[in-house]
C-alpha cells in the first residue's frame, strides 16, 4: 500500500489517492467467495465449501467484488488512517477505483475531526451592567396576579374588553390546493380580549386577534380573511392570506380583585402587599440578571467565533441538523402534530426543513466547539465529589416529574444512569466554562481562576473520605428515595423515564 497523494479540501475532508497491490484485492475476493458460500445455498456443496468459480457462477462477479471491497477496506483502511496520522470524524468513503492501472489506484474521502484555533480570548473586554426592574415591570406582575385571581361570571351580552371568550377556531390557507391539510384544524380556545393600548405583537394566531371578537354574542359565528405581516413569526405565512372561522361558545366577564393585603395573603406566605412586592422585586432582579448574563456570555462566545478558526466536515453539520430536527418531534407531539403533519402545514419537504434549520444548527455547532475548546484550554473540570451532588439533585428533580413506576424503570437500567451522568457532566462543564469567559470579559479572569481552584481543593478535601465512583451513583439513588439499580445479569429494556 502506498499513498501517492494526500490533500485536505476547504470543507475539512482528507482526499487520499492510494496504490494497493492487486494481490490484496485477489486475496479479498477469495475470502469474499468463501463468506458468500456460507450464506448462499449452493446445490452439491456444504456451506462454505463451494469453489470460487462455482460461487461466481451462482451470484455473479459483481457480488463477489462488492463483498471483497468491504473485506479489503476492513483491513486496509485502519492502516491507512494510522499512516496519515489524522483524526477522522467518522467513516471514510471509497470514491473511485481504477483497476486498469498497475498497481490499482483507490481514492478515499475522509471527514476530519473538528479543529478549533481560538483567538486570544483572554484579552476580550466587554461592558457588563447589573439590571434592576422598573416600576412598570413590577406593576405588570401585580396586574398578572390580579388577572390570575379574577372572578369569572357568565356574561349574557356581547364580548367586550377584558372578557374571556371561549371559541372554536379554524383556519385555511387562501391559496391552498385541493387535498392540502387545514392550516388550523377546528379546536376550542379561551381568549382574553385585550385592551386597545396593550401591545399584542406576540398575540396568537396574529396581533390584534382578540379584538376581532368584540361585539360577538354567545352562539354567533364570524369568518374573515387575515393577511400575515411580512415580519410575522410564521415565516411560511409572511405576506400570505388565511381564512379564519370563529364560533363563540361562551363569554365570561372578569372581575379583578383589589391590590391589597388580602390578595397578597391569597397568593403565598405574605402578610402584606409590601412583603409581596419585595419578593417580586427579588425574582425580577434575579431573572433580569440571569437574562443579562446569558446575553453577555453569548456576545463573548460570538466574538470569539468571529476571531477564531473553526473547521468541521459537512458530515458533522449534517448529523447535527438531523439531531436538531429529531428534537423538534416531542414539541410537535405536544401540539398534537407529527413531523409529516408539520411539513404538510408548511407546504415543505424534509429537504426544505433541513436547509431552513442548517444556519441555526451551524451557529450552534460553532458555539459548542468554541466552548468545549475553551474548557480544554482553561482546564475546566468538575471534581468527582461535586459531580455526585449534582447527579443527586438531578435524580431528585426527576423523581418529582415522573411516576414511581417510570422512575424504577429508569433506575433499573444502568445505561440510563450513565447517560444522565454524561449529560450532566457536559452541561456542568459548559456552565463553568461560560462563567469563566464571563469573568474574563469583565477583566476578572485571573480572580475567577484562583477562586474556582481553591473551591475545588476544598471540596475534594471535604469529601475525600466518602468519595465513590460516579458511575455507581448508589448514594444518589438513595438520596432520591429509590433503591439502587439491581445488577441481574440480564439485559434491561432501554426505557426512558
Image (cartoon, rainbow, N blue to C red):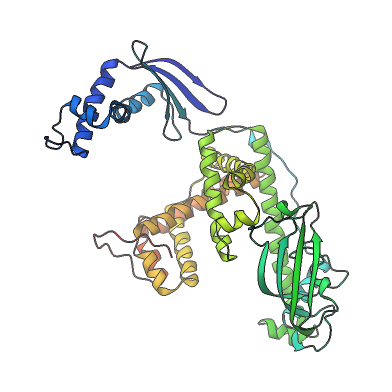
Task: State whether residue 281 appears in this view.
Answer: yes
Q: Furthest residue to the top?
A: 102
Question: For the C terminus, which image quadrant?
Answer: bottom left
Rendered location of residue 349, percent (x, y)? 60, 48
Between residues 345 and 309, which one lies in front from this camera angle?
345
Left/right of residue 219 with respect to residue 410 in the rendered view = right
Count of marks placed on residues: 0
Please, is residue 46 above or below residue 435 in the view? above
Q: Furthest residue to the right?
A: 197
Picture residue at 75% right of the left edge, 87% below the top: 151
Left/right of residue 358 with respect to residue 8 in the rendered view = right
Q: Furthest residue to the front?
A: 178
Between residues 287 and 444, which one lies in front from this camera angle?
287
**Residue 108 occupies which quadrant of the picture?**
top left
Between residues 188 and 85, which one lies in front from this camera angle?
188
Please, is residue 270 above or below residue 285 in the view? below
Please, is residue 351 above or below residue 182 in the view? above
Picture residue at 23% right of the left edge, 34% below the top: 36
Task: State whether residue 379 appears in this view.
Answer: no
Picture residue at 74% right of the left edge, 49% below the top: 128
Please, is residue 428 above or below residue 208 in the view? above
Left/right of residue 72 with respect to residue 161 in the rendered view = left
Rendered location of residue 165, percent (x, y)? 76, 79
Between residues 298 and 154, which one lies in front from this camera angle?
154
Question: For the N terminus, which image quadrant?
Answer: top left
Rendered location of residue 480, percent (x, y)? 42, 69
Rendered location of residue 107, percent (x, y)? 43, 21
Amino acid at each position: 500500500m502506498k499513498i501517492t497523494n494526500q490533500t485536505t479540501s476547504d470543507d475539512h475532508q482528507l482526499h487520499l489517492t492510494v496504490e494497493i497491490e492487486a494481490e490484496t484485492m485477489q486475496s479479498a475476493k477469495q475470502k469474499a467467495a468463501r463468506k458468500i458460500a456460507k450464506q448462499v445455498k449452493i446445490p452439491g456443496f456444504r456451506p462454505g465449501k463451494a469453489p470460487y468459480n462455482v460461487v461466481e457462477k451462482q451470484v455473479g462477479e459483481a457480488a463477489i467484488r462488492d463483498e471483497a471491497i468491504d473485506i479489503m477496506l476492513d483491513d486496509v483502511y485502519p492502516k491507512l488512517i494510522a499512516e496519515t496520522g489524522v483524526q477522522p470524524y467518522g467513516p471514510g468513503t471509497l470514491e473511485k477505483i481504477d483497476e486498469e492501472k498497475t498497481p490499482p489506484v483507490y481514492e478515499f474521502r475522509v471527514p476530519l475531526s473538528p479543529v478549533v484555533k481560538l483567538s486570544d480570548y483572554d484579552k476580550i473586554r466587554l461592558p457588563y451592567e447589573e439590571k434592576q426592574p422598573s416600576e412598570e415591570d413590577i406593576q405588570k406582575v401585580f396586574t398578572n396576579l390580579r388577572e390570575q385571581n379574577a372572578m369569572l361570571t357568565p356574561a349574557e351580552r356581547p364580548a367586550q374588553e377584558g372578557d374571556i371568550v371561549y371559541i372554536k377556531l379554524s383556519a385555511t390557507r387562501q391559496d391552498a390546493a385541493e387535498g392540502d391539510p387545514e392550516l388550523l384544524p377546528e379546536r376550542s380556545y379561551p381568549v382574553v380580549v385585550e385592551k386597545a393600548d396593550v401591545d399584542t405583537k406576540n398575540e396568537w394566531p396574529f396581533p390584534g386577534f382578540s379584538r376581532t371578537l368584540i361585539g360577538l354574542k354567545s352562539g354567533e359565528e364570524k369568518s374573515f380573511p387575515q393577511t400575515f405581516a411580512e415580519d410575522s413569526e410564521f415565516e411560511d405565512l409572511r405576506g400570505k392570506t388565511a381564512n379564519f372561522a370563529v364560533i363563540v361558545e361562551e363569554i365570561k366577564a372578569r372581575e379583578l380583585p383589589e391590590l391589597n393585603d388580602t390578595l397578597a395573603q391569597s397568593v403565598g406566605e405574605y402578610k402584606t402587599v409590601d412583603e409581596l412586592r419585595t419578593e417580586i422585586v427579588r425574582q425580577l432582579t434575579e431573572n433580569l440578571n440571569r437574562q443579562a448574563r446569558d446575553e453577555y456570555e453569548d456576545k463573548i462566545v460570538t466574538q470569539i467565533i468571529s476571531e477564531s478558526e473553526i473547521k468541521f466536515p459537512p458530515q458533522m453539520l449534517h448529523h447535527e441538523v438531523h439531531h436538531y430536527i429529531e428534537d423538534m418531534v416531542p414539541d410537535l407531539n405536544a401540539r398534537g402534530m407529527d413531523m409529516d403533519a408539520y411539513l404538510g402545514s408548511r407546504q415543505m419537504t424534509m429537504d426544505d426543513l433541513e436547509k431552513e434549520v442548517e444556519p441555526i444548527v451551524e451557529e450552534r455547532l460553532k458555539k459548542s466547539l468554541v466552548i468545549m475548546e475553551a474548557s480544554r484550554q482553561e482546564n475546566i473540570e468538575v471534581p468527582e465529589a461535586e459531580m455526585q451532588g449534582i447527579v443527586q439533585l438531578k435524580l431528585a428533580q426527576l423523581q418529582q416529574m415522573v411516576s414511581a413506576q417510570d422512575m424504577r424503570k429508569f433506575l433499573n437500567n444502568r445505561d440510563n444512569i450513565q447517560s444522565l451522568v454524561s449529560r450532566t457532566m457536559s452541561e456542568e462543564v459548559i456552565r463553568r466554562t461560560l462563567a469563566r469567559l464571563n469573568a474574563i470579559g469583565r477583566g476578572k479572569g485571573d480572580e475567577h481562576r484562583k477562586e474556582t481552584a481553591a473551591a475545588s481543593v476544598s471540596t475534594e478535601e471535604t469529601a475525600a473520605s466518602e468519595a465513590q465512583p460516579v458511575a455507581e451513583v448508589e448514594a444518589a439513588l438513595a438520596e432520591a428515595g429509590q433503591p439502587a439499580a439491581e445488577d441481574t445479569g440480564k439485559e434491561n429494556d432501554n426505557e426512558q423515564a
